[in-house]
Image: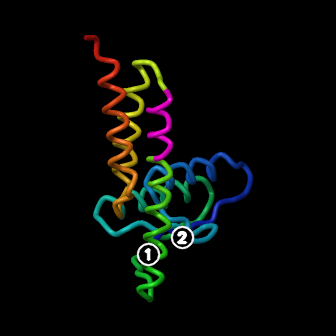
Amino acid sequence: MLVYRLPRDPSTPRIALWRRLRRLGAGQLLDGLAALPLTAETREQLEWLAEEVEEAGGSATVWLARPSTAAESRELEARMRDAADADYARVTAAARGKTDGRTIGRLRRAVRAIRARDYFGAPGREEAERAVAELAEEEVPA
C-alpha cells in the first residue's frame, strides 16, 4: 500500500501521481491510500512513487498489508477487476467502432497495458482481444 499526502497546490504532482497509480492498476482505498497486489515489481513501483511524492513536497510511505477479512479482500479484488473490465470494454467499443489502420496499433497497445494491470482476470479481456483481432483482419488487404 502507498500512503501519501501531497499539497493541493500545485495540482500537477497530484494529477501525475493519480495517473501513474491508475496505469499501475492500483485500487484507491481512500484519498491518499492506494493498494496493489504484492509483487517485486509493484513494490518497486510504489517505492518510486513514494520518492516522487516526497520530491514534490509531500510525504509517503509504502506498507505491506493484507485485508483483515476474506470479504474485504474480495471487495478490493472486485473493485480492481471491475476497473480493468471497464477499460477492456472501452477498447472493445473502440475496435467495433470502425476505425483506421493506425488505431489498430493503439488498441493493441491499450490491451497490453490493461493486461499488465489486470491482476485478477477481468472477464472482458478475451472480448477486447477478439475485437481488436477482428478489426486487424478487416484491415488486411485481400
For label 2, the crowd category at 10 Å Cα-Cα, with few meaning under 14, some 14 to 19 and many 20 or more, is some
Quadrant where the C terminus sits is top left
Q: From the image, give the main secondary structure of the stretch colored magenta.
A: helix
Q: Quick one: SS at disc 2?
A: strand
- What label does residue 63 carry, if any? 1
At 47% from the left edge and 23% from the top edge, which residue is drawn? 99
Magenta span: 89-97
Q: Position of residue 91 (x, y in %)?
A: 45, 39
Q: Is residue 93 magenta?
A: yes
Does residue 117 appear left or right of residue 29 in this picture? left
CA gap between label 1 and label 2 equals 8 Å
Given residues 131 and 20, the one toward you in this image is 131
Where 3 sits versus 42, above or below? below
User: What amino acid does circle 1 point to?
Assistant: Trp
Given residues 91 and 14, the one toward you in this image is 91
Q: Quick one: SS at disc 1?
A: loop
- What label does residue 3 carry, if any? 2
Type of colouring:
rainbow
Given residues 32 and 23, the one toward you in this image is 23
Tags 1 and 2 touching, CB below 8 Å:
yes
